[in-house]
Amino acid sequence: MPDGALRPFQVCVLAGCAVFHVEPVRAADAPPASDATEIAAGLDAGDEAWWAGDRRTARQRFADAWRDAATARAGGDPRDALAALEARARLRAMVLGTNLSPLRHQGALFRALDSCPPDSVACRLAEAELALLLPAGFGGDPAAVTGILEGLDDGPARARRVAAGADPALLRTPTGEPRPDLDGMGRAMLATRKRLPDNPGTRQLAVGLGGAPGAGIAATVRWVDPDAAGRAWTWDSQVGADTRGGGTLASSLAGRVAGGSVLVTRTVLDDWRTDVPVRRPLEALRMAAWGVPWVRPGTVPVALELGVDARTERVDGEDWVRALGPGGAVVLGADGARGGHAMRRGPWQVRLHGEAALGDLPHARAGADARVRLRAGATTVAFRAAGDAVLLDTSPWWRWPALGGASVLRGQPAGRWRDRHVLVAQAELRRPLAGPLGIALFQDVGRVSDGWHATAGAGLRVYVPGMEAATTRLDAGWVLDGPDRGTWGLVAGVGEAF
């Protein structure tokens, strides 16, 4: 492995993630840097590697930079530039590391900034990067960058403004040439045309626990390598089992705009079409391929997703049901792609989707899903409205949209309400408490043919800096109406419900 760099891996559990992480070590032929200019050059090289997608080299450069700056400061060098460089390098090591990285770097980062005088230009740049690179729940606020850098108009300050959303023309001279005083971040943005680098995560070995009423408790072992196949693809494999006798074996390979997967599952469903639910095992083999062939940036960005799905399924050990067909979606508010799916960077997204299948039981389904996130300081308020409809009478009941479980009508058993036509409305308030912990209050409402159903509740969150999809949640939901009124359920999972 080049430069002696050791890759991090992490073990995630319901209450959070325990991470086994080894920082990159310096190559034997690379002596420590002692001059602030040399350290800054290493940090710039790390930024250029990070924006270009070479996260291994970036981690190495950032580790060298914070160590060299910390060593120079420990030797008695009081310069503001060194304190700022240590803070900036530790910030990057924290963002590119794992969820234990804040335990190692956060305290030293803020101690370095606290040693800076308030008028230090170098330290104002570091404070702007905190607002730019940290997640919102951990103090990140790109809108604050302009105020922090007020009165500064050199190349590095302009680069931070552009990363926060300003016009990229700020990085060029009036004649269109790159400004000569740009640092590594500015040069990287010009070279890649990206305001911020992609962040597919780090190599992970995860052990996850989750569950919901009607779904049992599930344990999953998952391996993710974001730099597979020449660093252009993410390989994701997992194996799992649950207390109801179900199991999962899955593997996928996904690039930025395309991907494919193979999935073998056994799921024990509760069939609520009768007064007393009946457990029915569903076994399935599924192969799928998908991609994002078209993205149009702009005021209202639009992306097109397309895919094809082949599967064979059976319920209660009966005959296998085979199906093959396409699926797709038009996604408004998606200005990029990751893992072969449209990616939302902004506060809203509208998704119009559909699928069809020919085979033993022809199937067709269409729907719409709109989501909005509003932020006020550290508090986030999220809303979702969605509808799904089955279009053919031959569609098997297990492919109908359902309410209940870990994401919709939390507190109700999984699949408690299953119908050909379903409407959903959800609202959730999320707020960090201290460190990685946060809380959430939610209301879920859904409609099927017999009327509206609602649940409400509260939950605990364990956040992973820079990895919103890795948020661990534990929600308690109370049923507000119907035959189950007054009952409650506890659900757990990884990632927000919506």
Image (cartoon, grey):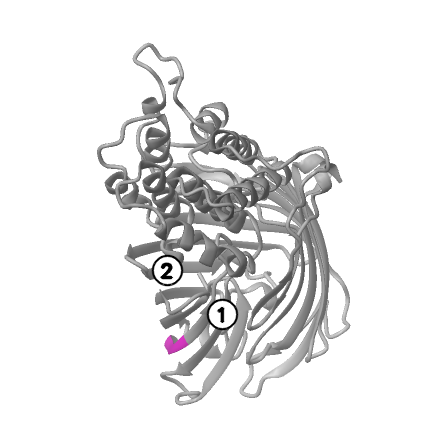
Give, as a three-letter code, the residue at label 1: Arg
Q: Position of residue 450 (x, y in %)?
A: 40, 76
214 displayed left or right of 426: right
**Residue visible at 50% across and 58% down in the picture:** 102
The segment highlighted magenta reads 452-458
Residue 195 vs residue 86, the one in the foreground: 86
Q: Position of residue 373 (x, y in %)?
A: 34, 55
Residue 5 vs residue 144, the one in the foreground: 5
Q: Is the Cβ of the residue at disc 2 closer than 8 Å to that at disc 1? A: no
Above or below 374: residue 82 = above
Where on the picture, by quarter, is residue 408? Answer: bottom left
> What residue is pinned by disc 2?
384
Which mark is first along the chain, 1 or 2?
A: 2
Q: Quadrant of the N terminus?
A: top right
Above or below 357: residue 46 = above
Q: Position of residue 478 (x, y in %)?
A: 40, 83
> What residue is pinned by disc 1?
473
Q: Position of residue 292 (x, y in %)?
A: 54, 37
**Residue visible at 42% across and 44% down in the picture:** 83
Give, as a three-letter code, the residue at label 2: Arg
Query: CA–CA distance between discs 2 and 1?
Result: 18 Å
Circle 1: element type: strand
Above or below 48: residue 339 = below
